[in-house]
Each structure stands twice: as structure tokens, then as C-alpha cells.
Image: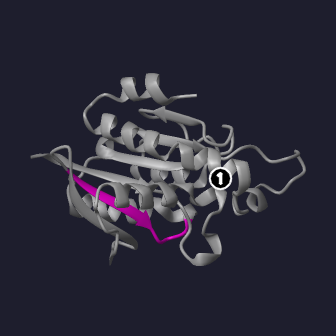
Amino acid sequence: MDTEWLVVGLGNPGSTYDLTRHNVGFDAIDWLAKEWSIPVNKGKFEGLYGQGIVDDHKVILLKPQTFMNLSGRSIQALAQFYKIPLERVVVLCDDITQAPGKLRIRPSGSAGGHNGLKDIIARYGSDAFPRVRIGVGQKPHPEYNLADWVLGRMDGADRTAFEKRLPDIEQAVRLIMKGQLAQAQNKFNG
């Protein structure tokens, strides 16, 4: 059995935030939980999590319940408890710089203005963790409030574009856990 992996979806807790752009990370975890038969229903480490086996890897799925800006607190607590190094923490999050449904898989990198990623990087003092950034589209015009945009519901064609990519996100995470991040990038980026 391979070392454990932690796959985290970023989002905000509570039904108010269901189906919002900022919660596509949670939505992706829900999809993985269903596909991999891993119930995400244990409450601890300021998050909801579940454990299972995927391709001979021990995997923990996590939805931090700290709100986006403190996501790193939940991740760090769980990862320390299970002794999971940062490079085995795969983060799924929204990306306003990508069109809806576009994916950007990276082995590391800056937060790019994303507060959830910013908090993880600040807590660890490192950006060396793989992430799958999920496009939710840009604000309709420059004056539009960014918080209103990311906390707005993603529906219609945008929602469909995202949902069509869920199987690709699942395959990308499997490749990352197999040590094939570059192949995941080649196959699914853009």
C-alpha cells in the first residue's frame, strides 16, 4: 500500500454557498467521493473528511469547514495528524482566470490572488503542492465586485461546462497520485 494522499476541495461551508463558483472544489470532492465510494462524513480537524483506497493509494478526501480564507488551518491539522507531506496534498479550487470548465494543473506556484491557496502557502511557508485549478470564468466587467462574482451561483452553460470536466478532474488526480503530473497537464490543461 502506497503512502497516503490528501485530496482537498476548497469552498465555504453551509447551504448558502452551494453551487457557487467558489465551491467548485467542494463539488469536485463530492464527485470523487461518489466515484471512489469514500463517504466524506467524518467531522474533525475543522473539516469533513473520509478515507478510502484508490489505485492502491490510501486517500483522504477533505472539505475544510473553516471558510475559504482559513482553509490551510484544516489542511495542516489533518495532514500533521496523518503525517502527510505537503507534496502529497492535492488541492482542487476555483480559478477566475480560466473559462468555465478549463483546467490548469500545476505542481506548485503562487496563490494567484486566491485566498484559500494564499492561506495554505502562508501556513506551510511553501507553495510546493499540486493543484487543479478549475475555471469558473472572469467577472462580467471590471467594476463587478469580485466577492459577489465568486460567491454567485454558477449555472446554465457555465455549470454544464464544469460538470463535463468532473471525470477529467478525477483522472487528473489519479495521475498526480501515480507521480504522473506532467501527463495530467498534457492531457487536461487548457
Up-down: is 19 above or below 137? below
Residue 180: x, y in percent? 31, 28
Magenta: main secondary structure equals: strand
- The residue located at (35%, 60%) in the rendering is 33
Q: Nearer the viewer, residue 185 or 165?
A: 165
Q: Count how many numbered circles sit on residues in the image.
A: 1
Q: Nearer the viewer, residue 13 or 124?
A: 13
Look at the image and tell me in which quarter the C terminus lies: top right
Up-down: is 108 above or below 62? above
Q: Quadrant of residue 14?
A: bottom right
Residue 154: x, y in percent? 69, 57
Up-down: is 48 above or below 55? below
Up-down: is 106 above or below 79? above
Q: Please say whether residue 62 is one of the residues in the magenta stretch.
A: yes
**Is 171 left, or right, of 147 in this rendering?**
left
Q: Nearer the viewer, residue 64 or 77?
A: 64
* Residue 145 visible to the viewer: yes
> Which structural element holds mark 1?
helix
* Crowding near the residue tagged with mark 1, few <14, some 14–19, many ≥20 C-alpha atoms within 10 Å: some
**Is 99 left, or right, of 109 in this rendering?**
right
- The residue located at (34%, 55%) in the rendering is 35
Residue assigned mark 1: 159
Q: Amino acid at mark 1?
A: Arg
What's drawn in magenta, residue-wise?
A: 58-67
Q: Quadrant of residue 97?
A: top right
Residue 69: x, y in percent? 57, 62
- The residue located at (66%, 43%) in the rendering is 100
Q: Please say whether residue 3 is one of the residues in the magenta stretch.
A: no
